[in-house]
Image (cartoon, rainbow, N blue to C red):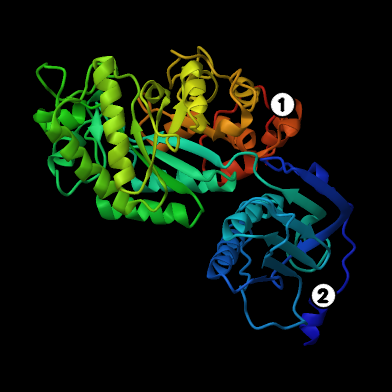
Amino acid sequence: MAACQTEKKEINFPKTDLASAPLIPKPIKTIATNSAFGLDSATVIYTSTIDPEFEKVGKFLSEKIKGKTGLELAVNSSLDETTGRMIYINQSDSTDLETPESYQLYIKKDSILLNAKTAAGAFRGIQTLRQLIPEKSNDTLTDHPLWVIPSGKIIDAPKFVHRGAMLDVARHFFIMDEVKKYMDILAYYKFNTLHLHLSDDQGWRIEIKSWPKLTEVGGATEVGGGKGGFYTQEEYKELVQYAAERYITIIPEIDMPGHTNAASFSYPFLNGNGKKLEAYTGTHVGFSTFDARKDTVYSFLDDVIGEIAAMTPGPYFHMGGDESHSTKKSDYIHFVEKVEKIVQKHGKTMIGWNEIAQAKIDPSSIAQLWNEPHNAIRAAENGSKIILSPAVKVYLDMQYDSLTKLGLHWAAYIPVDEGYNWDPETYVEGLPKESILGIEAPLWSETISNSAELEYLAFPRIVGVAELGWSTSENLNWDDYKVRLAQQAPYLKAMNINYYPTELVDWVEE
Protein backbone atom coordinates (compact mmCIF):
# COMPACT_ATOMS: atom_id res chain seq x y z
CA MET A 1 0.00 0.00 0.00
CA ALA A 2 2.75 2.46 0.94
CA ALA A 3 4.49 1.90 -2.39
CA CYS A 4 1.27 2.64 -4.25
CA GLN A 5 0.69 5.80 -2.22
CA THR A 6 4.10 7.16 -3.21
CA GLU A 7 3.08 6.80 -6.85
CA LYS A 8 0.28 9.28 -6.28
CA LYS A 9 2.26 12.03 -4.53
CA GLU A 10 2.14 15.52 -6.05
CA ILE A 11 4.66 16.15 -8.80
CA ASN A 12 5.66 19.70 -9.67
CA PHE A 13 5.58 19.54 -13.44
CA PRO A 14 7.34 22.18 -15.50
CA LYS A 15 4.91 24.50 -17.30
CA THR A 16 3.53 22.80 -20.39
CA ASP A 17 1.33 24.17 -23.16
CA LEU A 18 -1.25 21.88 -24.73
CA ALA A 19 -2.08 24.56 -27.30
CA SER A 20 1.41 24.32 -28.81
CA ALA A 21 1.39 20.52 -29.10
CA PRO A 22 2.10 19.49 -32.72
CA LEU A 23 -1.19 17.68 -33.27
CA ILE A 24 -2.15 16.60 -36.81
CA PRO A 25 -4.96 16.95 -37.76
CA LYS A 26 -5.38 20.19 -35.82
CA PRO A 27 -8.34 19.90 -33.38
CA ILE A 28 -11.30 22.28 -33.50
CA LYS A 29 -10.53 23.75 -30.08
CA THR A 30 -7.62 23.33 -27.66
CA ILE A 31 -7.57 24.99 -24.22
CA ALA A 32 -4.36 24.67 -22.20
CA THR A 33 -4.30 24.64 -18.38
CA ASN A 34 -0.49 24.68 -18.11
CA SER A 35 -0.03 21.67 -15.89
CA ALA A 36 0.55 18.03 -16.88
CA PHE A 37 -0.42 14.41 -16.48
CA GLY A 38 2.43 12.04 -15.68
CA LEU A 39 2.19 8.75 -17.59
CA ASP A 40 4.09 6.02 -15.74
CA SER A 41 3.95 2.35 -14.81
CA ALA A 42 1.27 2.98 -12.18
CA THR A 43 -1.15 4.48 -14.73
CA VAL A 44 -4.24 2.38 -15.45
CA ILE A 45 -6.79 2.47 -18.29
CA TYR A 46 -10.51 2.07 -17.71
CA THR A 47 -13.27 2.08 -20.29
CA SER A 48 -17.05 1.99 -20.46
CA THR A 49 -18.04 -1.67 -20.59
CA ILE A 50 -21.60 -1.48 -21.95
CA ASP A 51 -20.19 -1.53 -25.49
CA PRO A 52 -17.34 -4.10 -25.69
CA GLU A 53 -15.79 -2.07 -28.52
CA PHE A 54 -14.75 0.58 -25.98
CA GLU A 55 -12.66 -1.98 -24.11
CA LYS A 56 -11.01 -2.93 -27.42
CA VAL A 57 -10.10 0.74 -27.92
CA GLY A 58 -8.58 0.76 -24.44
CA LYS A 59 -6.53 -2.33 -25.22
CA PHE A 60 -5.38 -0.81 -28.52
CA LEU A 61 -4.19 2.28 -26.60
CA SER A 62 -2.42 0.13 -24.02
CA GLU A 63 -0.65 -1.81 -26.78
CA LYS A 64 0.51 1.39 -28.51
CA ILE A 65 1.70 2.93 -25.24
CA LYS A 66 3.72 -0.22 -24.57
CA GLY A 67 5.29 0.00 -28.04
CA LYS A 68 6.30 3.61 -27.50
CA THR A 69 7.27 3.65 -23.82
CA GLY A 70 7.64 0.03 -22.69
CA LEU A 71 4.95 0.61 -20.06
CA GLU A 72 2.38 -2.17 -19.62
CA LEU A 73 -0.87 -0.47 -18.60
CA ALA A 74 -3.68 -2.64 -17.29
CA VAL A 75 -7.09 -2.24 -18.92
CA ASN A 76 -10.21 -2.55 -16.74
CA SER A 77 -8.40 -4.34 -13.94
CA SER A 78 -10.11 -4.39 -10.52
CA LEU A 79 -10.41 -0.82 -9.27
CA ASP A 80 -7.90 0.16 -6.58
CA GLU A 81 -8.09 3.81 -5.55
CA THR A 82 -4.52 3.75 -4.31
CA THR A 83 -3.01 3.11 -7.69
CA GLY A 84 -1.56 5.89 -9.79
CA ARG A 85 -3.14 8.09 -12.41
CA MET A 86 -6.04 6.97 -14.58
CA ILE A 87 -7.05 7.20 -18.24
CA TYR A 88 -10.81 6.72 -18.63
CA ILE A 89 -12.41 6.13 -22.05
CA ASN A 90 -16.06 6.96 -21.53
CA GLN A 91 -19.10 6.25 -23.70
CA SER A 92 -21.01 9.51 -23.44
CA ASP A 93 -24.45 10.58 -24.63
CA SER A 94 -23.56 14.28 -24.50
CA THR A 95 -25.34 16.36 -27.14
CA ASP A 96 -22.06 18.25 -27.57
CA LEU A 97 -20.74 15.18 -29.38
CA GLU A 98 -22.46 16.01 -32.67
CA THR A 99 -20.99 13.32 -34.97
CA PRO A 100 -20.11 9.63 -34.50
CA GLU A 101 -16.39 10.49 -34.63
CA SER A 102 -16.53 13.49 -32.27
CA TYR A 103 -14.60 13.29 -29.03
CA GLN A 104 -13.67 15.38 -25.99
CA LEU A 105 -10.37 14.99 -24.18
CA TYR A 106 -9.90 16.35 -20.65
CA ILE A 107 -6.37 16.08 -19.29
CA LYS A 108 -5.80 16.83 -15.60
CA LYS A 109 -2.89 16.17 -13.26
CA ASP A 110 -4.25 12.86 -12.00
CA SER A 111 -6.60 11.73 -14.77
CA ILE A 112 -7.38 11.79 -18.47
CA LEU A 113 -11.02 11.56 -19.52
CA LEU A 114 -11.91 10.78 -23.14
CA ASN A 115 -15.61 11.17 -23.99
CA ALA A 116 -17.09 9.77 -27.20
CA LYS A 117 -20.49 8.56 -28.35
CA THR A 118 -19.08 5.68 -30.36
CA ALA A 119 -16.03 3.46 -30.28
CA ALA A 120 -14.98 5.07 -33.57
CA GLY A 121 -15.00 8.47 -31.86
CA ALA A 122 -13.02 7.04 -28.94
CA PHE A 123 -10.52 5.55 -31.38
CA ARG A 124 -9.99 8.95 -33.06
CA GLY A 125 -9.50 10.46 -29.61
CA ILE A 126 -6.81 8.02 -28.56
CA GLN A 127 -4.81 8.96 -31.67
CA THR A 128 -4.68 12.50 -30.29
CA LEU A 129 -3.56 11.13 -26.93
CA ARG A 130 -0.87 9.01 -28.62
CA GLN A 131 0.47 12.12 -30.33
CA LEU A 132 0.67 13.91 -26.97
CA ILE A 133 2.94 11.27 -25.41
CA PRO A 134 6.54 12.45 -25.83
CA GLU A 135 9.11 10.22 -27.50
CA LYS A 136 11.30 10.21 -24.37
CA SER A 137 10.57 10.07 -20.66
CA ASN A 138 11.43 12.81 -18.22
CA ASP A 139 12.86 10.97 -15.21
CA THR A 140 14.35 14.08 -13.63
CA LEU A 141 10.94 14.71 -12.03
CA THR A 142 10.74 11.32 -10.31
CA ASP A 143 12.88 8.32 -9.47
CA HIS A 144 11.25 6.33 -12.30
CA PRO A 145 10.46 6.92 -16.00
CA LEU A 146 7.61 9.39 -16.55
CA TRP A 147 6.11 10.72 -19.78
CA VAL A 148 4.73 14.24 -19.36
CA ILE A 149 1.45 14.98 -21.18
CA PRO A 150 0.32 18.64 -21.16
CA SER A 151 -3.00 19.32 -19.44
CA GLY A 152 -6.11 21.00 -20.80
CA LYS A 153 -9.17 20.36 -22.90
CA ILE A 154 -9.56 19.33 -26.55
CA ILE A 155 -12.92 19.49 -28.33
CA ASP A 156 -12.79 17.83 -31.73
CA ALA A 157 -14.79 16.40 -34.63
CA PRO A 158 -14.09 15.75 -38.31
CA LYS A 159 -15.03 18.16 -41.09
CA PHE A 160 -15.80 15.35 -43.54
CA VAL A 161 -17.44 11.95 -43.09
CA HIS A 162 -15.08 10.38 -45.69
CA ARG A 163 -11.32 10.73 -45.20
CA GLY A 164 -9.62 8.24 -47.43
CA ALA A 165 -6.49 6.97 -49.10
CA MET A 166 -6.45 4.81 -52.23
CA LEU A 167 -3.75 2.27 -52.94
CA ASP A 168 -3.28 0.81 -56.42
CA VAL A 169 -2.29 -2.81 -55.86
CA ALA A 170 -3.02 -3.66 -59.52
CA ARG A 171 -0.15 -1.98 -61.42
CA HIS A 172 2.25 -3.38 -58.82
CA PHE A 173 1.15 -5.85 -56.17
CA PHE A 174 1.66 -4.98 -52.49
CA ILE A 175 1.83 -7.77 -49.94
CA MET A 176 -0.35 -7.94 -46.83
CA ASP A 177 2.27 -6.53 -44.44
CA GLU A 178 2.83 -3.51 -46.69
CA VAL A 179 -0.89 -2.73 -46.79
CA LYS A 180 -1.19 -3.21 -43.02
CA LYS A 181 1.73 -0.88 -42.35
CA TYR A 182 0.09 1.80 -44.50
CA MET A 183 -3.16 1.34 -42.55
CA ASP A 184 -1.33 1.75 -39.24
CA ILE A 185 -0.11 5.21 -40.22
CA LEU A 186 -3.44 6.19 -41.78
CA ALA A 187 -5.17 5.32 -38.50
CA TYR A 188 -2.69 7.45 -36.51
CA TYR A 189 -3.72 10.49 -38.57
CA LYS A 190 -7.46 9.73 -38.28
CA PHE A 191 -8.20 8.41 -41.78
CA ASN A 192 -11.29 6.21 -41.86
CA THR A 193 -11.22 4.72 -45.38
CA LEU A 194 -8.83 2.65 -47.48
CA HIS A 195 -9.84 2.24 -51.14
CA LEU A 196 -8.10 -0.72 -52.78
CA HIS A 197 -7.75 -0.56 -56.58
CA LEU A 198 -7.87 -4.33 -57.08
CA SER A 199 -7.88 -4.67 -60.87
CA ASP A 200 -6.45 -2.98 -63.94
CA ASP A 201 -4.95 -3.79 -67.33
CA GLN A 202 -1.77 -5.05 -65.67
CA GLY A 203 -3.19 -7.30 -62.98
CA TRP A 204 -6.17 -8.80 -61.13
CA ARG A 205 -5.54 -8.99 -57.39
CA ILE A 206 -8.53 -10.60 -55.66
CA GLU A 207 -9.48 -14.29 -55.73
CA ILE A 208 -12.89 -14.97 -57.27
CA LYS A 209 -13.75 -18.60 -56.65
CA SER A 210 -16.31 -18.82 -59.46
CA TRP A 211 -13.79 -17.44 -61.99
CA PRO A 212 -10.37 -18.87 -60.97
CA LYS A 213 -8.46 -17.77 -64.08
CA LEU A 214 -8.79 -14.14 -62.97
CA THR A 215 -5.96 -14.75 -60.52
CA GLU A 216 -4.31 -17.76 -62.21
CA VAL A 217 -3.81 -15.74 -65.40
CA GLY A 218 -4.67 -12.13 -64.58
CA GLY A 219 -2.85 -12.14 -61.24
CA ALA A 220 0.47 -13.28 -62.72
CA THR A 221 1.50 -9.94 -64.27
CA GLU A 222 2.34 -6.38 -63.25
CA VAL A 223 3.98 -3.27 -64.70
CA GLY A 224 7.50 -3.98 -65.89
CA GLY A 225 7.01 -7.74 -66.10
CA GLY A 226 7.18 -8.68 -62.42
CA LYS A 227 5.51 -11.78 -61.00
CA GLY A 228 2.37 -9.99 -59.79
CA GLY A 229 0.36 -11.63 -57.05
CA PHE A 230 -3.11 -11.57 -55.52
CA TYR A 231 -5.00 -11.79 -52.24
CA THR A 232 -6.84 -14.99 -51.49
CA GLN A 233 -10.31 -14.47 -50.10
CA GLU A 234 -9.00 -15.35 -46.63
CA GLU A 235 -6.24 -12.75 -46.97
CA TYR A 236 -8.69 -10.12 -48.13
CA LYS A 237 -10.92 -10.88 -45.13
CA GLU A 238 -7.85 -10.49 -42.92
CA LEU A 239 -7.18 -7.05 -44.39
CA VAL A 240 -10.82 -6.10 -43.85
CA GLN A 241 -10.59 -7.23 -40.22
CA TYR A 242 -7.29 -5.40 -39.67
CA ALA A 243 -8.91 -2.26 -41.07
CA ALA A 244 -12.00 -2.69 -38.88
CA GLU A 245 -9.83 -2.87 -35.76
CA ARG A 246 -8.61 0.62 -36.76
CA TYR A 247 -12.10 1.86 -37.63
CA ILE A 248 -11.13 1.99 -41.29
CA THR A 249 -13.60 0.95 -43.98
CA ILE A 250 -12.20 -0.96 -46.97
CA ILE A 251 -13.65 0.05 -50.34
CA PRO A 252 -12.90 -2.56 -53.03
CA GLU A 253 -12.60 -1.36 -56.61
CA ILE A 254 -12.94 -3.44 -59.75
CA ASP A 255 -12.22 -0.94 -62.53
CA MET A 256 -14.47 -1.26 -65.59
CA PRO A 257 -15.47 -1.15 -68.44
CA GLY A 258 -11.98 0.16 -69.27
CA HIS A 259 -8.77 -0.81 -67.45
CA THR A 260 -9.88 -4.42 -67.96
CA ASN A 261 -7.15 -6.14 -70.00
CA ALA A 262 -6.15 -8.53 -67.18
CA ALA A 263 -9.74 -9.73 -66.82
CA SER A 264 -10.32 -10.07 -70.57
CA PHE A 265 -6.99 -11.83 -71.06
CA SER A 266 -8.14 -14.32 -68.41
CA TYR A 267 -11.59 -14.74 -70.00
CA PRO A 268 -11.59 -13.53 -73.63
CA PHE A 269 -15.40 -13.49 -73.98
CA LEU A 270 -15.37 -10.31 -71.86
CA ASN A 271 -13.38 -8.36 -74.42
CA GLY A 272 -15.11 -5.57 -76.32
CA ASN A 273 -12.38 -3.92 -78.39
CA GLY A 274 -12.07 -6.65 -81.05
CA LYS A 275 -8.29 -6.81 -80.73
CA LYS A 276 -6.04 -9.77 -80.02
CA LEU A 277 -5.51 -10.19 -76.29
CA GLU A 278 -2.15 -10.55 -74.60
CA ALA A 279 -0.73 -9.91 -71.14
CA TYR A 280 -0.04 -6.22 -70.59
CA THR A 281 2.82 -4.88 -68.47
CA GLY A 282 3.07 -1.32 -69.82
CA THR A 283 1.54 1.88 -68.49
CA HIS A 284 -0.67 3.24 -71.28
CA VAL A 285 -4.40 3.57 -70.54
CA GLY A 286 -7.65 3.63 -72.47
CA PHE A 287 -7.20 0.72 -74.87
CA SER A 288 -9.26 -1.97 -73.12
CA THR A 289 -12.98 -2.40 -72.64
CA PHE A 290 -15.52 -4.98 -71.65
CA ASP A 291 -18.26 -5.79 -74.17
CA ALA A 292 -21.10 -3.66 -72.79
CA ARG A 293 -23.80 -5.37 -74.89
CA LYS A 294 -23.15 -8.99 -73.95
CA ASP A 295 -25.36 -10.58 -71.27
CA THR A 296 -22.61 -13.00 -70.21
CA VAL A 297 -20.46 -10.02 -69.19
CA TYR A 298 -23.10 -8.99 -66.67
CA SER A 299 -23.49 -12.58 -65.41
CA PHE A 300 -19.73 -12.57 -64.83
CA LEU A 301 -19.92 -9.23 -63.00
CA ASP A 302 -22.82 -10.46 -60.87
CA ASP A 303 -20.57 -13.29 -59.64
CA VAL A 304 -17.53 -11.04 -59.10
CA ILE A 305 -19.41 -8.25 -57.33
CA GLY A 306 -21.37 -10.80 -55.29
CA GLU A 307 -18.27 -12.58 -53.99
CA ILE A 308 -16.49 -9.33 -53.12
CA ALA A 309 -19.59 -7.77 -51.52
CA ALA A 310 -20.06 -10.85 -49.33
CA MET A 311 -16.54 -10.35 -47.90
CA THR A 312 -16.83 -6.58 -47.49
CA PRO A 313 -18.86 -5.34 -44.51
CA GLY A 314 -18.47 -1.69 -45.56
CA PRO A 315 -21.32 -0.05 -47.51
CA TYR A 316 -19.45 0.63 -50.77
CA PHE A 317 -18.36 -1.02 -54.00
CA HIS A 318 -16.26 1.03 -56.46
CA MET A 319 -16.83 0.21 -60.13
CA GLY A 320 -14.09 2.45 -61.51
CA GLY A 321 -15.47 3.85 -64.74
CA ASP A 322 -12.53 6.07 -65.67
CA GLU A 323 -10.66 6.44 -68.97
CA SER A 324 -12.89 4.09 -70.97
CA HIS A 325 -11.67 5.60 -74.22
CA SER A 326 -12.35 2.43 -76.28
CA THR A 327 -15.99 2.22 -75.18
CA LYS A 328 -18.65 3.99 -77.24
CA LYS A 329 -20.40 6.62 -75.14
CA SER A 330 -23.80 4.91 -75.50
CA ASP A 331 -22.24 1.59 -74.48
CA TYR A 332 -20.48 3.24 -71.54
CA ILE A 333 -23.73 4.76 -70.23
CA HIS A 334 -25.55 1.44 -70.66
CA PHE A 335 -22.75 -0.37 -68.81
CA VAL A 336 -22.65 2.01 -65.83
CA GLU A 337 -26.41 1.82 -65.37
CA LYS A 338 -26.40 -2.00 -65.56
CA VAL A 339 -23.49 -2.34 -63.10
CA GLU A 340 -25.13 0.07 -60.66
CA LYS A 341 -28.15 -2.26 -60.46
CA ILE A 342 -25.88 -5.27 -59.81
CA VAL A 343 -24.04 -3.39 -57.04
CA GLN A 344 -27.36 -2.42 -55.45
CA LYS A 345 -28.63 -6.00 -55.76
CA HIS A 346 -25.71 -7.07 -53.57
CA GLY A 347 -26.54 -4.48 -50.93
CA LYS A 348 -23.84 -1.93 -51.68
CA THR A 349 -23.70 1.72 -52.67
CA MET A 350 -21.85 2.31 -55.93
CA ILE A 351 -18.90 4.67 -56.22
CA GLY A 352 -17.29 5.52 -59.54
CA TRP A 353 -14.81 8.00 -60.96
CA ASN A 354 -16.31 11.27 -62.18
CA GLU A 355 -17.02 9.95 -65.69
CA ILE A 356 -19.99 7.95 -64.34
CA ALA A 357 -21.97 11.20 -64.09
CA GLN A 358 -22.55 10.89 -67.84
CA ALA A 359 -24.98 8.06 -67.05
CA LYS A 360 -28.33 8.36 -65.30
CA ILE A 361 -27.05 7.23 -61.92
CA ASP A 362 -29.11 6.85 -58.77
CA PRO A 363 -28.75 9.76 -56.30
CA SER A 364 -27.40 7.24 -53.76
CA SER A 365 -24.36 6.53 -55.98
CA ILE A 366 -21.20 8.54 -55.35
CA ALA A 367 -18.96 10.25 -57.90
CA GLN A 368 -15.23 10.57 -57.21
CA LEU A 369 -13.77 13.69 -58.79
CA TRP A 370 -10.32 13.32 -60.27
CA ASN A 371 -10.29 15.55 -63.37
CA GLU A 372 -13.69 16.82 -64.50
CA PRO A 373 -15.36 19.39 -62.22
CA HIS A 374 -18.35 19.66 -64.57
CA ASN A 375 -19.13 15.98 -64.04
CA ALA A 376 -18.86 16.40 -60.26
CA ILE A 377 -21.32 19.29 -60.40
CA ARG A 378 -23.62 17.27 -62.66
CA ALA A 379 -23.58 14.37 -60.18
CA ALA A 380 -24.25 16.75 -57.27
CA GLU A 381 -27.18 18.31 -59.11
CA ASN A 382 -28.51 14.77 -59.45
CA GLY A 383 -28.37 14.41 -55.65
CA SER A 384 -25.17 12.35 -55.51
CA LYS A 385 -22.40 12.97 -52.98
CA ILE A 386 -18.89 13.75 -54.23
CA ILE A 387 -15.49 12.49 -53.05
CA LEU A 388 -12.76 14.98 -53.91
CA SER A 389 -9.55 13.50 -55.36
CA PRO A 390 -8.29 16.19 -57.75
CA ALA A 391 -5.22 14.83 -59.52
CA VAL A 392 -3.43 18.19 -59.43
CA LYS A 393 -3.64 18.29 -55.61
CA VAL A 394 -3.88 14.82 -54.05
CA TYR A 395 -2.54 12.28 -56.53
CA LEU A 396 0.33 11.02 -54.40
CA ASP A 397 2.04 9.41 -57.39
CA MET A 398 2.79 12.84 -58.83
CA GLN A 399 6.43 13.86 -58.43
CA TYR A 400 7.38 16.51 -55.89
CA ASP A 401 9.51 18.25 -58.52
CA SER A 402 11.49 17.55 -61.68
CA LEU A 403 14.28 15.84 -59.68
CA THR A 404 12.03 13.26 -57.99
CA LYS A 405 13.11 9.80 -59.14
CA LEU A 406 9.77 8.08 -58.44
CA GLY A 407 6.35 9.08 -59.67
CA LEU A 408 4.86 10.77 -62.72
CA HIS A 409 3.95 14.34 -63.57
CA TRP A 410 1.21 14.24 -66.20
CA ALA A 411 -1.16 16.10 -63.84
CA ALA A 412 1.33 18.33 -62.02
CA TYR A 413 4.39 18.48 -59.85
CA ILE A 414 3.00 18.55 -56.31
CA PRO A 415 5.45 19.85 -53.70
CA VAL A 416 4.39 19.39 -50.08
CA ASP A 417 3.03 22.91 -49.67
CA GLU A 418 0.98 22.70 -52.90
CA GLY A 419 -0.58 19.46 -51.70
CA TYR A 420 -1.71 21.22 -48.51
CA ASN A 421 -2.59 24.71 -49.71
CA TRP A 422 -6.15 24.27 -50.95
CA ASP A 423 -9.54 24.14 -49.33
CA PRO A 424 -11.69 21.15 -50.34
CA GLU A 425 -14.87 23.04 -49.39
CA THR A 426 -14.28 25.77 -51.99
CA TYR A 427 -12.06 23.96 -54.54
CA VAL A 428 -14.81 23.24 -57.10
CA GLU A 429 -16.65 26.44 -57.95
CA GLY A 430 -20.38 25.82 -57.84
CA LEU A 431 -20.17 22.60 -55.80
CA PRO A 432 -22.17 23.01 -52.56
CA LYS A 433 -20.41 22.05 -49.34
CA GLU A 434 -23.24 19.73 -48.41
CA SER A 435 -22.60 17.68 -51.58
CA ILE A 436 -19.03 16.86 -50.51
CA LEU A 437 -18.77 13.47 -48.81
CA GLY A 438 -15.06 13.96 -48.23
CA ILE A 439 -11.54 13.74 -49.58
CA GLU A 440 -9.37 10.87 -50.76
CA ALA A 441 -5.71 10.71 -51.82
CA PRO A 442 -4.99 8.10 -54.52
CA LEU A 443 -1.56 6.52 -54.91
CA TRP A 444 -1.21 4.88 -58.31
CA SER A 445 1.62 2.39 -58.57
CA GLU A 446 3.08 2.55 -62.07
CA THR A 447 6.49 3.56 -60.64
CA ILE A 448 6.44 1.97 -57.17
CA SER A 449 6.61 -1.67 -56.11
CA ASN A 450 7.43 -1.82 -52.38
CA SER A 451 6.81 -0.06 -49.06
CA ALA A 452 9.87 2.19 -49.21
CA GLU A 453 8.83 3.57 -52.60
CA LEU A 454 5.18 3.86 -51.56
CA GLU A 455 6.18 5.80 -48.44
CA TYR A 456 8.50 8.15 -50.31
CA LEU A 457 5.62 9.39 -52.47
CA ALA A 458 2.90 9.24 -49.79
CA PHE A 459 4.74 10.85 -46.90
CA PRO A 460 4.58 13.58 -45.86
CA ARG A 461 1.85 14.62 -48.33
CA ILE A 462 -0.74 12.16 -46.98
CA VAL A 463 -0.32 13.75 -43.54
CA GLY A 464 -1.48 17.05 -45.02
CA VAL A 465 -4.47 15.32 -46.60
CA ALA A 466 -5.38 14.03 -43.13
CA GLU A 467 -5.63 17.62 -41.93
CA LEU A 468 -7.56 18.80 -45.00
CA GLY A 469 -10.14 16.08 -44.39
CA TRP A 470 -10.50 16.55 -40.63
CA SER A 471 -9.75 20.12 -39.59
CA THR A 472 -11.96 23.16 -40.06
CA SER A 473 -11.13 25.47 -42.95
CA GLU A 474 -10.28 28.20 -40.42
CA ASN A 475 -7.56 25.95 -38.96
CA LEU A 476 -5.82 25.29 -42.29
CA ASN A 477 -2.64 27.39 -42.35
CA TRP A 478 0.59 26.28 -44.04
CA ASP A 479 2.92 28.31 -41.80
CA ASP A 480 1.37 26.76 -38.69
CA TYR A 481 1.06 23.30 -40.25
CA LYS A 482 4.68 23.04 -41.41
CA VAL A 483 5.88 23.59 -37.82
CA ARG A 484 3.69 20.75 -36.60
CA LEU A 485 4.70 18.59 -39.57
CA ALA A 486 8.38 19.10 -38.71
CA GLN A 487 7.71 17.53 -35.32
CA GLN A 488 6.27 14.36 -36.87
CA ALA A 489 9.78 13.26 -37.86
CA PRO A 490 10.49 11.21 -34.69
CA TYR A 491 7.23 9.27 -35.13
CA LEU A 492 7.84 8.67 -38.85
CA LYS A 493 11.36 7.47 -38.06
CA ALA A 494 10.14 5.24 -35.22
CA MET A 495 7.71 3.64 -37.69
CA ASN A 496 10.50 3.22 -40.29
CA ILE A 497 8.65 5.43 -42.77
CA ASN A 498 10.82 6.38 -45.74
CA TYR A 499 9.41 9.91 -46.01
CA TYR A 500 10.53 12.61 -48.44
CA PRO A 501 12.50 15.17 -46.37
CA THR A 502 11.29 18.29 -48.19
CA GLU A 503 13.39 21.40 -47.63
CA LEU A 504 10.17 23.38 -47.18
CA VAL A 505 10.00 21.94 -43.65
CA ASP A 506 12.60 22.41 -40.91
CA TRP A 507 12.47 18.80 -39.73
CA VAL A 508 13.05 18.12 -36.03
CA GLU A 509 16.03 15.84 -35.45
CA GLU A 510 15.88 13.44 -32.52
Task: Identify the residue shown where x is 49% and y is 16%.
Answer: 374
Residue 129 placed where, x, y %?
69, 54
SS of the residue at dot 1? helix
Task: Identify the residue shown where x is 80% and y is 54%.
Answer: 153
Instruction: Indicate which disc, 1 or 2, sits on the residue closer to the N terminus.
Output: 2
Query: What amino acid does circle 1 point to?
Result: Trp
Quadrant in the picture for the N terminus: bottom right
Viewer-nearest residue: 136 or 296: 296
The relative height of residue 402 versus residue 311 in the rendered view (above or below) is above
The single residue placed furthest to the bottom in the displayed view is 1
Residue 366 placed where, x, y %?
45, 34
The disc label shown at residue 31, or none: none
Q: Dot 2: within a 10 Å radius of its alpha carbon, few (fewer than 14), some, or many (20 or more) residues?
A: some
Viewer-nearest residue: 230 or 393: 393
Q: Is residue 389 at all visible to an observer of this figure?
A: no
Residue 363 placed where, x, y %?
45, 34
Residue 295 placed where, x, y %?
14, 33
Calculate the distance from the C-alpha at mark 1 to the C-alpha at mark 2. Answer: 41 Å
Label 2, on which residue?
A: 8
Q: Is residue 101 at all visible to an observer of this figure?
A: yes
Quadrant in the picture for the C terminus: top right
Using residue 433 as the reference point, say whether residue 178 is left or right of it. Answer: left
Query: What amino acid does circle 2 point to?
Result: Lys
SS of the residue at dot 2? loop
Image-quadrant location for residue 417: top right
Viewer-nearest residue: 285 or 384: 384
Figure label count: 2
Task: Identify the residue shown where x is 82% and y is 78%.
Answer: 6
The relative height of residue 110 versus residue 353 in the rendered view (above or below) is below
Label 1, on which residue?
A: 478
